[in-house]
Amino acid sequence: MASERQSEVSEDMLESIDELKERLSSMKKMMEERKAAGAATKDLFQGQAKSLHGTNMIDANFLSFVFGGSLIVILSVSIYAFYNLYHAVLKKFPSTHTEL
């Protein structure tokens, strides 16, 4: 009974492996046909909408501007918070000079 079950499992695995090999070979053929037709691999993954070709909503300059602005905001808020914390600590624990 166990040997029958193992043989069924191995046959199922062989069938699935054969199916995967067939799918892989068909995908390779499709890729070769596209390359032969003159379509570059870059064009394979781009959208097909004609109105969006050549337009980028967010380019590198805009993205660097946004990240730079957020960095400036974070740094200014941090400096402001530490400045207020420093003065609050000085107010809570004033230093008394007794040397005079």
Image (cartoon, rainbow, N blue to C red):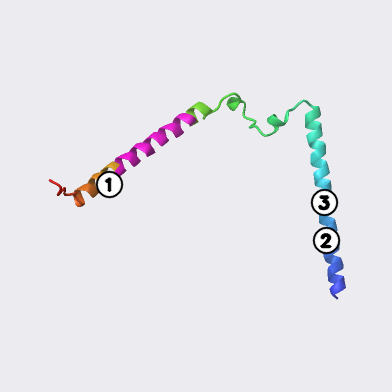
Gap in angstroms between the C-alphas marked 3 and 2: 11 Å
The crowding category of the residue bearing disc 3, from other C-alpha atoms within 10 Å (few below 14, some 14 to 19, many at least 20), is few
Q: Looking at the picture, how far across and down is residue 35, in whole percent?
A: 78, 30
Q: Earlier in the sequence, mark 3 or mark 1?
A: 3
| Residue at 81 percent of width and 39 percent of height | 28
Disc 1 versus disc 2: distance between alpha carbons?
69 Å
Q: Work out which quarter of the rendered image holds the C terminus and state it.
A: top left
Q: Nearer the viewer, mark 1 or mark 2?
A: 1
Residue 14 belongs to magenta span: no
Kind of residue sitting beneath label 2: Asp
Is 67 in front, or is 82? 82
Q: CA distance from mark 3 to mark 1?
A: 67 Å
Mark 2, Cα crowd under 10 Å, few <14 / some 14-19 / many 20+, is few
> Can residue 59 be seen?
no
Q: Secondary structure at mark 1?
A: helix
At 45% across and 34% down in the image, what residue appears?
67
Mark 3 lies on a secondary structure that is helix
The 10 Å Cα crowd at callout 1, few under 14, some 14 to 19, many 20 or more, is: few
Q: Label 1 belongs to which residue?
A: 85
- Return the residue nearer the eye: 37 or 58: 58
- Magenta extent: 64-82
Residue 39 x %, y %? 74, 27
Label 1 vs 2, first from the N-terminus: 2
